[in-house]
Amino acid sequence: MLHDTPAEPAGGVAHPSRLRRRAARSLRGAAAVGFCVVIAGVTSCSGSASGAHKQTQPSTDTALIIAAPANHNAADAAFFTALITHHGQGLELSALASVRSTNTNLTAFARQSGVAMQADLDVMKALLVQWTDDADAKPGGDSSQNTPKGMTDQAAMNKLTALSGNEFDTLWLQTVLNLHVGALDMANGEIVNGTNVDAVGLAQRLTKTEQTAIDHINEIREQTGNG
């Protein structure tokens, strides 16, 4: 037999059973928001209130920015600045592939690569903003440094914009291969010389993603006879 909870008297104190239920609901609501974290600009929550929509969990490969910026050294700053320039050219190459190539495998790889590089750029730029201990210093250090490893010159970029079809694919694949090899080399150097936990963590992730990209490019080259 069901028992009704006594109604609250007008202007009086709520019945104890009602207070317990309200407290339980408040605790569940707090738990839903208490476990939210921000990863590369995407919010995900490990807890949810009753009836709430489930949050899409980010990939375990997504770069994580810690709440408080840690110390960094010149190698960390140089790595980020070089990689930002490097990924900038990567985005240009990805955009070129979408309009100059008809190879579906190549254009699909270019789109995926572009998305990944943009995500890396967002993380690196956010971290550079956090590194405010020496606001007057340029994060890249010596501006006379050579062009980042693996990048192509402007003449080659201009040539790519004038090509199409198989000729474009051949030069594009070689150019992008060099770019990813250069990124892998820079990442390995950061792991050895860097001290910032976020920068080194990004470099460690890049050693996997860049090698995967290199393998994928070589597969496309073999499939198309551009190897």
Image (cartoon, rainbow, N blue to C red):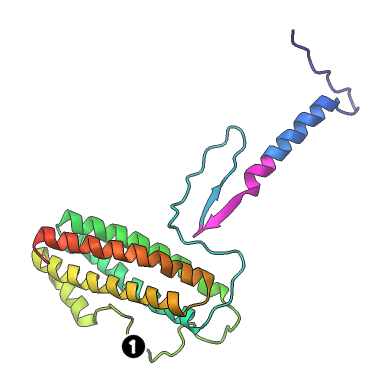
**Residue at the far top in the pictured view:** 1
Asked whether 179 or 85 is in front, the reply is: 179
For image coordinates 16% across by 76% down, the residue present is: 159
Residue 5 location (% of width, % of height)? 80, 18
Determine if the magenta segment contains residue 33: yes
Residue 201 location, x and y as percent? 47, 67
Residue drawn where x is 24% and y is 55% of the image: 108
Type of amino acid at the residue the image marks with label 1 = Asn
State yes or no: residue 152 in magenta.
Answer: no
Residue interval drawn in magenta: 29-41
Q: Residues within 10 Å of mark 1 (few under 14, many from 20)?
A: few
Spot occupied by residue 149 in the image (x, y as percentages of width and height): 31, 80
Residue position marked by numbered label 1 in the rendering: 146
Q: Nearer the viewer, residue 70 or 81?
A: 70
Q: Which residue is found at the position 54% from the left and 73% from the top? A: 129
Label 1 secondary element: loop
